[in-house]
Image (tube, grey):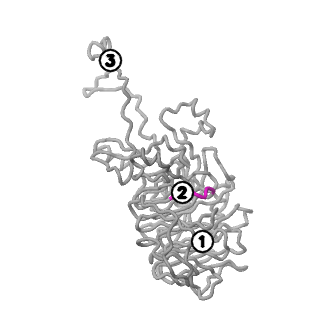
Amino acid sequence: MAKRTATDSANTADESQKFPRASGSGIPRDTHTNGEMGEFEDAFEDEIESDEDVVDADGDNMDDMNDGMDVDEVLPAIEESDEQPAAPETYIHGTHKLGPGEILEPDDSVYIMRHSLKVTWPCLSFDILRDNLGDERQKLPATAYLATGTQADTAQGNELLVYKMSSLHRTQKDGDSDSDADDDDDDDGDHLDEDPVLEYRSVPHHGGINRVRAQPLTSLGPVSQPYHVATWADTGKVHIWDVRPLIESLDVPGYSLDKDRVHKPVFTVNAHGRAEGFALDWATSSHSSTRLLTGDTYGKIFLTTSTPTGFNTFAQPFLSHTSSVEDIQWSPSEAFVFASCSADRTIQIWDVRAKGRKSIAGVDAAHDSDVNVISWNKINSYLLLSGGDDGGLKTWDLRNVKKREDGGPASVPLASFNWHQGPITSVEWHPTEDSIFAAAGDDDQVTMWDLGVEQDDEEMGTNTSSQDVPPQLLFVHQGQQHIKEVHWHAQIPGAVVSTAYDGFNIFKTISV
């Protein structure tokens, strides 16, 4: 959540030019220096006051000038007021507008943890990597691993990166004291003043990276087991990488990276020709084979599967979309079923065993314009979430979706929200709560929703803002520019990571 405060224009300009100091980094390819590929912001960097004596313009020491002088004889006593200063107003996007000299400041009282990471080149897609630190981790400070990729100014300047973010401590709130921190349930009081630490490894990647997806694993398994990450390049190629050595090099002191191995992809999907793409998804690891779906801007979807000797891409594409395939999701419960969405405004449901490589069901005119993203509920597998260029968020009951041969009226969503003021760029269901999801939009908002919340009649009658703020809207996170993706951390309950043009945010709120 954000609050707005008044400031003069000079301070506003200064705030926009702040760049934090590096709090730690790895050394990718033995060439980068600290902070080159990213650094955490230091929220308290500018709050340290100097202990030097105050000197006036003539060079005289002010303490010497005040010797023998009673301050009360010169300055009248300042009367204390019992009135509390007005609390900053909560900023609601689309309702409020910033006035001259106003800026947004985060309200840290609603965050359990909040950290920002600035990057050299935009990383517009990422995925959270599974680690061996355990599930259901509640205690702070936290550690998280990410796989991401850059969009540099030259094709040769891009990289696939593995980030290790550690010492992610609890947010220090106004009024916190050492004793309060020591009594905190998270037992992280000793870490409040520590900087978060960023370490990373990278490999060269030809072409900007449109989408990054990590193979879903229930555990990392033995060191010999690969950990595959796929990247959709703007060159029209999809590369599969084994990032396991990069993770090991971050965790094991003295680990020696085999550059000949890690700097080359395990496999490259060339079936899309020169067509660019964004749609990318792995089947869950519980299935018998490793399978990857890729969709391009020409409406074609290809399937790549693992074989005893490596990977193989089927030559025949899946064809039902008439425009760019924007997103793909495997079913969490049906091994051979997947969903896709497109700029043709439709959502299609497919079965890889079906003849003709055509969709078996779908939703026509799911949104008023391009359908950008979808997410399949992992708990209630009949629920599908979609977000469009129209700013709308919709939940669909797949049990009521029309089959291809059916006629009749169009499918109707279970729920629909139009809070965002720009195209939806990312949606994702909560990994363990079947009614909660997160969304991101090009209006610089990350929102969290709970479909299980309903507003009763009495509340509707007394809450004048009920029409402005849907009761299902739990939380709004702001402060990033052009947000592109948001993901829940499956092993740290309630933790969320988002990426935008200006870097990453990782946070945990009191609302979820």
Residue bearing mark 1: 399
Asked whether the viewer can see residue 276, the reply is: no
Tell whether label 3 touches label 2 (CB within 8 Å): no
Q: Which quadrant of the figure has residue 151?
A: bottom left
Q: Please state the total of marks drawn on the protein image.
A: 3
Residue underneath mark 3: 64
Q: Which numbered disc, 2 or 3, marks the residue closer to the eye?
A: 2
Identify the secondary structure beneath mark 2: loop
Q: Is residue 363 above or below residue 5?
A: below
- Asked which quadrant contains residue 218, the reply is bottom right
Q: Residue 435: horizontal and vertical position, in percent?
A: 58, 57
Magenta stretch in the rendered image = 432-438
Q: Residues within 10 Å of mark 2 (few under 14, many from 20)?
A: some
Up the image or down, 254 lies above or below 306; here it is above
180 above or below 46?
above
Relative image position of residue 75 (x, y in whole percent): 27, 17
| Mark 1 surroundings: few (<14), some (14-19) or many (≥20) residues within 10 A | few
Q: Nearer the viewer, residue 99 or 207?
A: 99
First in sequence, mark 2 or 1: give its number. 1
The amino acid type, in three-letter code, at marker 1 is Arg
Of the image marks 2 and 3, the number of the one nearer the N terminus: 3
Closer mark to the observer between disc 1 and disc 3: 1
How far apart marks 2 and 3 lie (CA) works out to 67 Å
Say which amino acid is labelled 2. Leu
Crowd around label 3: few <14 · some 14–19 · many ≥20 (10 Å): few
Instruction: Judge from the rendering whether residue 254 lies leftward or rightward of residue 401; answer left or right.
Output: right
Q: CA distance from mark 1 to mark 3?
A: 83 Å
**Which residue corresponds to the image point at 62% horizontal and 52% vertical from the top-left?**
492
- Name the element at disc 3: helix
Q: Residue at x 42, y 37 (%)?
A: 47
What label does residue 451 carry, if any?
2
